[in-house]
Image (cartoon, helix red, strand yellow):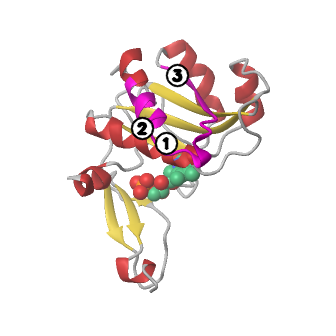
Amino acid sequence: MIKDLVIKSRSYRRFYQETAIELETMRELVDLARLSPAAGNVQPLKYILACDPQRNALIFPHLAWAGYLKDWPGPDEGERPSAYIIILGDREVSRSIDCDHGIAAQSILLGATEMGLGGCIIGSIQRRGLQKALDIPSRFEILLVLALGKPRERVVIETVGTTGDIKYWRSSDDIHHVPKRPLDEVIIG
Ligand SMILES: Cc1cc2nc3c(=O)[nH]c(=O)nc-3n(C[C@H](O)[C@H](O)[C@H](O)COP(=O)(O)O)c2cc1C
């Protein structure tokens, strides 16, 4: 079952934008992150939730989408995320954040998948611009943005071929293909 969930939990970048996500749903997702492992159990992560069109519109321009899809600038109006969770590091709790935000992000995405939603971790963020747009105090460092919504695209996993190319790609039938390295390549001993 966990394998089914992990396989289903792909990076989705096109959504039914009009399908709203309730604030309570977003809070449930952050609760999964809150209950996840934290280095030294220090728990320096904080979250900003956005699930209304006005706030979403402030966030979207600061994100970069699918770097390997050179001809695709990102989701069009109508297929953009209906919600975002911004993961922040609270510098007053800890100066250095380990890999807590990655774990938190995966907990949230697995939870979203179980709810029939989907999303994408965005690390390529114009941080200064987003900090200003949302008036985020400087004690909070923007670590990741999670884009969320009801997925509007098909994503399939395949095995990395003999060329070793790991770049995801989109076929003419609009399916997003994600090559994964084979198990025997990643287990080295
Ligand atoms: C730390 C991290 C940062 C990422 N940043 C971006 C990003 O800025 N923009 C984007 O479109 N996808 C981003 N992704 C999504 C990856 O491109 C995606 O995970 C990868 O292509 C594999 O696809 P999959 O998640 O469906 O397995 C990021 C993923 C991770 C884990």
The magenta span reads 28-50
As drawn, is 155 to the left or to the right of 65? left
The disc label shown at residue 41, or none: none
Q: Tag 3: Cα neighbours inside 10 Å, few (<14), some, or many (≥20)?
A: some
* Residue that protrudes farthest toward the front in the picture: 40
To which residue does mark 1 refer?
A: 105
- Disc 1: residue Cβ within 8 A of ligand 1's nearest atom: yes
Q: Which mark is residue 108?
A: 2
* Badge 2 amino acid: Ile
- Three-letter amino acid code at disc 3? Leu
On the picture, is 102 further left or further right than 150?
Answer: right
Is 54 covered by the magenta stretch?
Answer: no
Residue at x 71%, y 37% (from the top left corner): 126
Is 85 displayed left or right of 133 in the figure?
left
Q: Is residue 41 magenta?
A: yes
Read off the residue under disc 3.
Answer: 49
2 and 1 marks in contact (CB < 8 Å) = yes
Q: Is residue 28 visible?
A: yes
Distance of mark 3 from mark 1, alpha carbons? 13 Å
Residue found 64% across the figure and 35% down from its top: 44
Give left or right: position of 82 versus 39.
left
Q: Position of residue 6 (x, y in %)?
A: 31, 53
